[in-house]
Image (cartoon, rainbow, N blue to C red):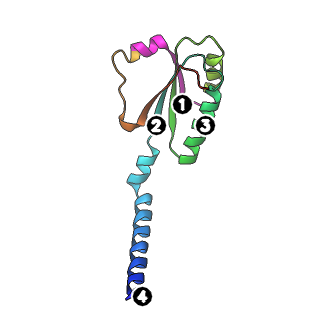
Amino acid sequence: MIIVLLLYGLAIYGFVTIWVQVIRRTAWWGKLRKQELHLLILLHDSEAYIEWLYRSLDAMSRSTGRPIAITFIDCGSQDQTLRIIQMLTKEDQYITIIDQSQFKQAFPNSIEFNGDRTILIDLRTTMI
């Protein structure tokens, strides 16, 4: 009796393992993982952590294989935030910069989110 239960358990485990591998390797799973993630990041005097944030997001993108596009929205920074972002745009074509007035023109009433692929991150407060 115990041997039969053990064999059934191993058979179920093997079936589930094979099923998961088949699903992970099918085309629809790959398409789901490869959809671009768009980040809208609101900034104000964020020079202390903006480059760290970008490097972390880039590393996440590379490790998961999911491409990201980043739109930095400057809300009147008085420090070196814009200069740092301009340096980052030279090395990454998926970064754009807009100021607060352009953001209000582009999204006057609400942000049109593209399902779960658009995320708004507000970094206008101090991160300490």
Label 2 sits on a secondary structure element that is strand
> Which residue position is annotated with label 4?
3
Q: Could you give the CA–CA distance between mark 4 and mark 2, rounded to whole angstroms?
A: 49 Å
Which kind of residue does numbered mark 2 sit on? Leu
Residue 59: % across, % down: 60, 41
Instruction: Describe residue 75's horizontal placement relative to residue 78 as left or right.
Output: left
User: Is there a contact, CB below 8 Å, between mark 3 and mark 2?
Assistant: no
User: Residue tagged by mark 1?
Assistant: 94
**Residues in magenta?**
91-105
Spatial separation of the CA atoms under disc 3 and disc 2:
15 Å
Disc 1 from disc 4: Cα separation: 57 Å
Nearer-the-camera pick, 30 or 48: 48
- As displayed, is residue 17 above or below residue 104? below
The residue shown at (38%, 52%) is 28
Extreme residue in the left direction: 109
Disc number lying in front (1 or 3): 3
The disc label shown at residue 37, or none? 2
Judged from the image, the secondary structure of the residue bearing numbered disc 1 is loop
- Determine the image quadrant of residue 53: top right
Q: Amino acid at mark 1?
A: Tyr
Viewer-nearest of discs 1 and 4: 4
**Residue contact at pointers 4 and 2, CB within 8 angstroms:** no
Q: Which residue is mark 3?
A: 56
Amino acid type, callout 4: Ile
Residue 48, given in percent of the width and then of the height, sits at 66, 23
Q: Residues within 10 Å of mark 4 (few under 14, many from 20)?
A: few
Give the position of the N terminus as an image quadrant.
bottom left
Answer with mark 3 or mark 2, whichever residue precedes in sequence. 2
Q: Residue at x 45, y 13 (%)?
A: 102
Q: Earlier in the sequence, mark 1 or mark 2?
A: 2
Marks 1/2: CA–CA distance: 11 Å
